[in-house]
């Protein structure tokens, strides 16, 4: 498949799905490195790099950030498959940000609030996307991503504080009209979904009693993107306040 062929659908809908992005051996290596990182590195990290539903229960790890401090994941930012997919979709040279990992552990009750990533990133132009790779089977039951199709074409909506760790801001006026346009994305391990920085997305909680919903993701931006410093400062101040109020240590 030529990644360029996906661009018309990405431009129209604000997201595309690619099945089995990586050769099988590369996916196996990635999952092994994630297992190593969770086992050996996560217990040494400050609170703001690894979020738990309940810190006294390691199996409730729900998000990891700043993974680029680890040599394997720093190098992964240059992965040619991820970067060429991103470049084909944004239509220019790209630069990857540090990898992230998201989980909805079994038996937890956290939704992902409706949001637009570029409300957090504050990049102008919004020529940025997220590649989100499923590590488990992902479906309605364990909290698949839901996109509001075409919403990337209608600008940034108003956001306000959420009380959900890892997603400090959510859209304030999410409506039935948005819900009607939602597309649920079901994935198998190794499939990716790619969304534009302005595409509204959300996820329900994982209602399964036994299945995790893990994903490995990278935000990749076009070289033309510039940071809106003022907007970013406002966002990071709000996030810092949320972390303080939730008792996270740096
Ligand atoms: O994993 C999730 O539930 C949300 C992930 C997300 O919002 C993102 O990668 O942009």
Image: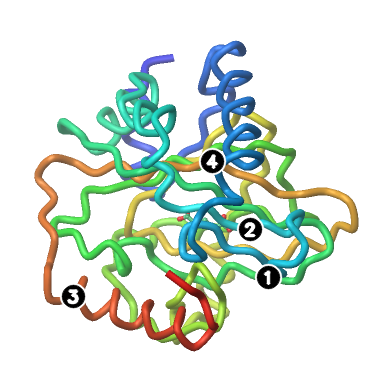
Point 59% across, 44% down: residue: 215
Helix, strand or loop status at disc 1: loop
Mark 1 or 3, nearer chain start: 1
Cα separation between marks 4 and 3 = 27 Å
The residues tagged by marks 3 and 2 sit, at their Cα atoms, a distance apart of 27 Å
| Lower sequence index among marks 4 and 3 | 4
Q: Considering only order in the chain, which callout, 2 or 4, is on the residue closer to the N terminus?
A: 2
In the image, 176 versus 80, the foreground residue is 80
Q: Which residue is mark 3?
A: 231
Where's residue 10, x and y in %?
Answer: 37, 41
What distance separates the C-alpha of mark 1 from that of mark 2? Answer: 9 Å
Kindly identify the residue that appears in the image at 55 percent across and 51 percent down: 44
Classify 10 Å Cα crowding around label 2: few (below 14), some (14-19), many (20 and above): many
* The quadrant where residue 39 appears: top right
Residue annotated with mark 4:
216
Secondary structure, mark 2, is: strand
Q: Within the image, what quadrant is residue 70 found in?
A: top left
């Amino acid at each position: 498949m030529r990644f360029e062929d996906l661009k018309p659908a990405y431009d129209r809908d604000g997201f595309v799905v690619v099945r089995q992005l990586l050769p099988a051996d590369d996916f196996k290596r990635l999952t092994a490195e994630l297992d190593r990182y969770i086992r050996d590195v996560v217990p040494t990290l400050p609170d703001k790099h690894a979020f738990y539903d309940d810190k006294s229960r390691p199996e409730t790890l729900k998000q990891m950030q700043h993974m680029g401090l680890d040599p394997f994941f720093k190098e992964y930012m240059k992965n040619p498959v991820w970067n060429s997919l991103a470049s084909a979709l944004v239509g220019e040279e790209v630069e990857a940000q540090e990898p992230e990992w998201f989980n909805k552990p079994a038996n937890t009750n956290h939704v992902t609030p409706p949001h637009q990533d570029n409300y957090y990133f504050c990049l102008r132009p919004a020529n940025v996307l997220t590649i989100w790779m499923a590590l488990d089977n992902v479906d309605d039951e364990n909290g698949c991503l839901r996109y509001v199709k075409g919403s990337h074409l209608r600008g940034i909506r108003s956001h306000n504080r959420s009380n959900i760790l890892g997603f400090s801001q959510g859209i304030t006026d999410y409506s039935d009209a948005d819900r009607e346009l939602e597309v649920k994305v079901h994935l198998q391990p190794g499939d990716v979904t790619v969304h534009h920085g302005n595409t509204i997305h959300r996820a329900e909680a994982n209602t399964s009693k036994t299945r995790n919903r893990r994903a490995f993701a990278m935000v990749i931006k076009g070289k033309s993107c510039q940071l809106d410093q003022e907007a970013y400062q406002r966002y990071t101040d709000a996030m810092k306040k949320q972390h303080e109020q939730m008792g996270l240590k740096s």
